[in-house]
Amino acid sequence: MTRILLVGASSAIAAACARRWAADGAQLMLVGRDADKLEAIARDLTVRGAASVSTFVLDALDTPRHAEMLAAAVHTLGTIDIALIAHGTLPNQQACQLDVSQTLRELASNATSVIALLTLLATHLEGQQHGSLAVITSVAGDRGRPSNYVYGSAKAAVSTFCEGLRPRLFKAGVSLTDIRPGFVNTPMTAGLPLPAMLVAEPDTVATRIVHGIARKRDVLYVPAFWAIILLIVRLLPRPLFKRLSC
Ligand SMILES: NC(=O)c1ccc[n+]([C@@H]2O[C@H](COP(=O)([O-])OP(=O)(O)OC[C@H]3O[C@@H](n4cnc5c(N)ncnc54)[C@H](OP(=O)(O)O)[C@@H]3O)[C@@H](O)[C@H]2O)c1
């Protein structure tokens, strides 16, 4: 039986992953800031076949309580086989440009709170000498763009952190998967004018995420075609890139 810790468990992408793990009979601990949402997801996962589902209410910005959350997870799950960090927020780029405090809040939500959790969980899994750590970043972290560079730089910080952390964990037999979705149809993107052809459903990306974590992939673009798109985007010369307004 796989024992799984999900932080940001009310995310549409995380919940879709959890449904797959539940169907395989996993034991899950769901962490999020909204108790009612967690309870509703827990009930659904139980019906779908999870061995057991527990919940822990935590605002990820409350870093002093991260250790308490991990202690509860260890108490409930024993060994942690998979830990997935999924929480995040999509900032209003224009508003951030005019308000430093909003920019810093978004960096806390998408970067520093995630890095704090990775630090704690990495040391724990390293001590176990076993496990898979995974975090949802974004294709937006591959290159800063004028329309979303606050979000993109936060995700890039996490991806760069993972690049450095991965070799350390590898030596302890622990994998670290950096999951980089493109556009996904979730509450985060609701109402945004996205190109329909490029928007994936949470269940589709969850299949690839669950499979990628099981195969201990280092970096996972979801869907896979984003790896090619981002390769092209990264190769665009800077003199051309700065003339774009995407
Ligand atoms: N959707 C996309 O197109 C897309 C693309 C690339 C990357 N991503 C990333 O994928 C991840 C999941 O997002 P999603 O698309 O599934 O969107 P979502 O359904 O809106 O999920 C975002 C989740 O983050 C949680 N959250 C935000 N701040 C939190 C905090 N301080 N403490 C605890 N939980 C917090 C939210 O909790 P509440 O339910 O309580 O609000 C919500 O469950 C995010 O990291 C996002 O950046 C999404």
Image: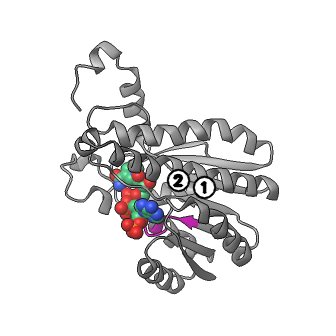
Callout 2, which amino acid? Answer: Ser
The magenta region covers 6-15
Callout 1, which amino acid? Answer: Leu
Query: Mark on residue 113?
Result: 2
Image coords of residue 98 (percent x, y):
24, 40
Q: Is the shortest distance between ligand 1 and the CB of mark 2 under 8 Å?
A: yes
Q: Secondary structure at mark 2?
A: helix
For the residue pair 75 and 83, the one nearer the viewer reads as 75
Q: Does residue 8 belong to the magenta stretch?
A: yes
Q: Residue at x 44, y 53 (%)?
A: 109
Which quadrant holds the C terminus? top left
Q: Residue at x 34, y 16 (%)?
A: 238
CB within 8 Å, label 1 to label 2 = yes
Q: Does residue 114 belong to the magenta stretch?
A: no
Count the marks: 2
Image coords of residue 58 (percent x, y):
52, 70
Q: Secondary structure at mark 1?
A: helix
Q: Residue at x 55, y 73 (%)?
A: 30
Q: Residue at x 62, y 83 (%)?
A: 52
Image-quadrant location for residue 144: top left
Which quadrant holds the N terminus? bottom right
Image coords of residue 55 (percent x, y):
56, 78
Residue pointed to by mark 1: 117
